[in-house]
Amino acid sequence: MHALNSLSNALLSMLTRKPCTGYELTKLLQLFWQAQHSQIYPLLGKLEQGGLVTFELICQTGKPDKKVYSITDAGTAKLQQWIREQPPMEYQERDEFLIKVYAIGVMEPETARRLFLERRDALLARLTRLEAQIKLMDEEEGIPVTDLASRQFGRYLLYQRKVRIIKEEMEWVDWSLPLFKSSVTID
Amino acid sequence: MHALNSLSNALLSMLTRKPCTGYELTKLLQLFWQAQHSQIYPLLGKLEQGGLVTFELICQTGKPDKKVYSITDAGTAKLQQWIREQPPMEYQERDEFLIKVYAIGVMEPETARRLFLERRDALLARLTRLEAQIKLMDEEEGIPVTDLASRQFGRYLLYQRKVRIIKEEMEWVDWSLPLFKSSVTID
DNA sequence: AATAGCATGTAAAGTGTTACATGATTTC
DNA sequence: GAAATCATGTAACACTTTACATGCTATT
């Protein structure tokens, strides 16, 4: 079987923690690789055909039946192999806001400043949501342990990173804002 | 004409600074919205048909002829309008490294630690490259001014952000590494 | 009565990457 | 002599998003 794409690896990564349905994976993956269920369901099928995951059909009453997927030994081996590989120095970082920032000179100062204020609000909202999400996940899966030996360690590192990313951008916005103000007061 | 996609807006954003060829745009856009020339050339054609940019054909000897694109008033207006719009709370943040981090528990401690050390090296290399790129751009287009009134202001803010993003991740890696070490020494 | 959650799937459209194609000049 | 730079373009493939499709239960 040829190399897996990022989403496949993300699915395997998530399944190292515990078996999940496609529905759950769609939601859990929001944390580090969001994808729609329309992409996830067919991929799970392919991974299953490739022997990297298996599923158990759980019949339910009142709710639709579901397929609970687990990672196989072959899947774990494949994932480990991919983790070891060095990525080809990719760097996406596609943030629409940066497009706006680059062209900020075409906007009126007051509009520009408002844009940054709105961004700050959005970041704060995102941080709040993330922290709520983390709290929820901690309740469901137990507070991640800071010990490398634990299977929870990766989640702990990820949380730290996600929170830091948002806080760093907030600091940048706060650093930028005075530059707008001073220019506006000259007017 | 219906709403433009992100890449179209990125092209317009870049053209607010100065007229460019598709070839130049491909390189300049690396800074905040990388795309291949195979995507950029056709899009420039569409923007031209839509009246948002115009081009002047420059015939050269020794080098291939080129099309120098400029943003039109209609293009600037369209860009301003898009900048004002509030984005639908998107948040991509698709970083393959985070997939690896999440599943770090399946790796041997020593492999895990090496992964982070390699990441630190890669980040340092990226920072070095970015700073060289910034220096080069500053030489070509003049050091960006910290004054909002200047057309260079957006570039200044962007540079700050890009450098900060990398430094923040380096700090996170450095914060994480001791957690690996302590676990390894117990062994 | 309407919305949200559970749960899976397919089809179509849009976006992005890799490969194919050309050809002169300059640098190593 | 090989590789890189300049400069544009198309075709094929891979990935992502949006829309279509179904249907029961619990909440507002």
Image (cartoon, coloured by chain):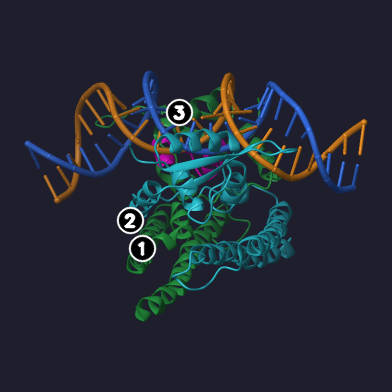
Chain colours: A cyan, B green, C orange, D blue
Disc 2 on helix, strand or loop?
helix
* Quadrant of the snapshot with the N terminus of chain A: top left
Q: Amino acid at mark 1?
A: Leu
Examine the residues drawn in magenta and state their main secondary structure.
helix
Residue B75 image point, x, y percent: 61, 34
Rendered view: A175 above or below C25 = below
Q: Which residue is mark 3?
A: B56
Rendering coords of residue B38 (x, y %): 40, 31
- Amino acid under disc 2: Arg
x, y percent for residue A85 = 32, 53
Mark 1 — residue?
Answer: B115
Q: Quadrant of residue A21?
A: top right
Occupied quadrant, residue A187: bottom right
Q: Residues within 10 Å of mark 2 (few under 14, many from 20)?
A: some
Q: For the residue labelled by badge 3, is the local secondary structure a helix, a strand or a loop?
A: strand
Q: Chain of mark 3?
A: B
**Mark on residue B99?**
none
Disc 2 is attached to a residue of which chain? A
- Residue B42 relative to residue B59: left or right: right
Give the residue drawn at x 33%, y 37%.
Answer: A2
Q: Is residue B15 visible?
A: no
Q: Which residue is mark 2?
A: A84
